[in-house]
Image: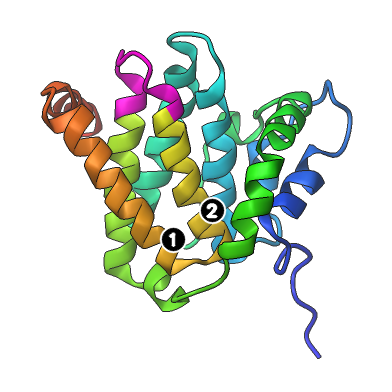
Amino acid sequence: MTRRPEHAEAGTRALLDTFATGDPDGHLQLGELFSGLGKRSFGMLLFVSTVPAFIPIPGLAGALSGPLVVLVGLQLLVGLRKPWLPGFVARRGPRRASLMRFRDRLAPWLARLERVVRPRWPQLLDHRLANLMTGVQLVLLGILLLLPLPFTNLLFGALLLLFALALLERDGRLMGIAWLAGAVAIGVFGVLSGALASEAARWVDVLV
């Protein structure tokens, strides 16, 4: 019998416990997140990338989370099977103490969510169109995080956690809910304000 990867069956809370364990003053390198996770790697990278969005310091959340979320979205758009990070980014990451605090704060909510979140419609998550939809929304939400929109970091952070949990738990139904919520947020805070279009155009100019 083939042995499955170490983290293949672990739930989100168990994965967080694993990655948070160690020297509290040490850092969790982002490159460590991919080991043994397979198709769930994007979910764990997105989950950890969202942690700074909950830091109550104006400007810092977007500067840290925004570019990483955009990077995850772009890689889903181009169809990568496993996340790629440049070496200088892969060697960095959040302090384990910060991840522990984040885990403890989310633990009651994750406990409730894990009762209803489970692998469903996994074929939806593997479809190319689904990756395109997820990638586009993550890129736009990441850009919105970078914009100076007051009192929105927690909202965008919560939305990004929905995407991360859907990818981690292989829950296509939850991903559908994340798409709907993301479209509403992008429409309300991005398109209607006009700021998202101009910022997205700037990013396209940089990439091209």
Query: What sort of colour scheme is used for the picture?
Result: rainbow
Circle 1 Cα neighbour tier, 10 Å, few/some/many (<14 / 14–19 / ≥20): many
The residue at 57%/58% (across/down) is 168
Magenta stretch contains residue 208: no
Q: Point out the image quarter for the C terminus.
A: top left
Answer with left or right where residue 36 lies relative to residue 44.
Answer: right
The residue identified by callout 2 is: 165
Q: Which of these two is toward me, 77 or 167?
A: 167
Left or right relative to 120: residue 145: left
Vertical arrangement, residue 7 with respect to residue 121, above or below: above
Mark 2–mark 1 distance (CA, rounded to whole Å): 8 Å
Question: Is the C-beta separation of discs 2 and 1 under 8 Å?
Answer: yes
Left or right: residue 163 compared with residue 116: left
| 66 to 33, vertically: above or below | above
- Please tell me which residue is depicted at 44% across the width and 18% down the height of the picture: 63
Residue 179 in the image, given as x and y percentages of width and height: 31, 53
Above/below status of 100 relative to 198: below
Q: In this view, does 91 lie to the left or right of 138?
A: right
Q: Mark 1 points at which residue?
A: 174
Q: Can residue 204 be seen in this view?
A: no
Tell which of 7 and 114 is nearer to you.
114
Whole-percent x and y of residue 107?
A: 71, 42
Query: Which amino acid, by three-letter code, is at mark 2?
Result: Leu
Q: Earlier in the sequence, mark 2 or mark 1?
A: 2
Element type at mark 1:
helix
Q: Looking at the figure, which quarter contains the N terminus?
A: bottom right
Q: Give the range drawn in magenta.
A: 144-154
Q: What residue type is labelled 1?
A: Leu
View extreme (bottom): residue: 1
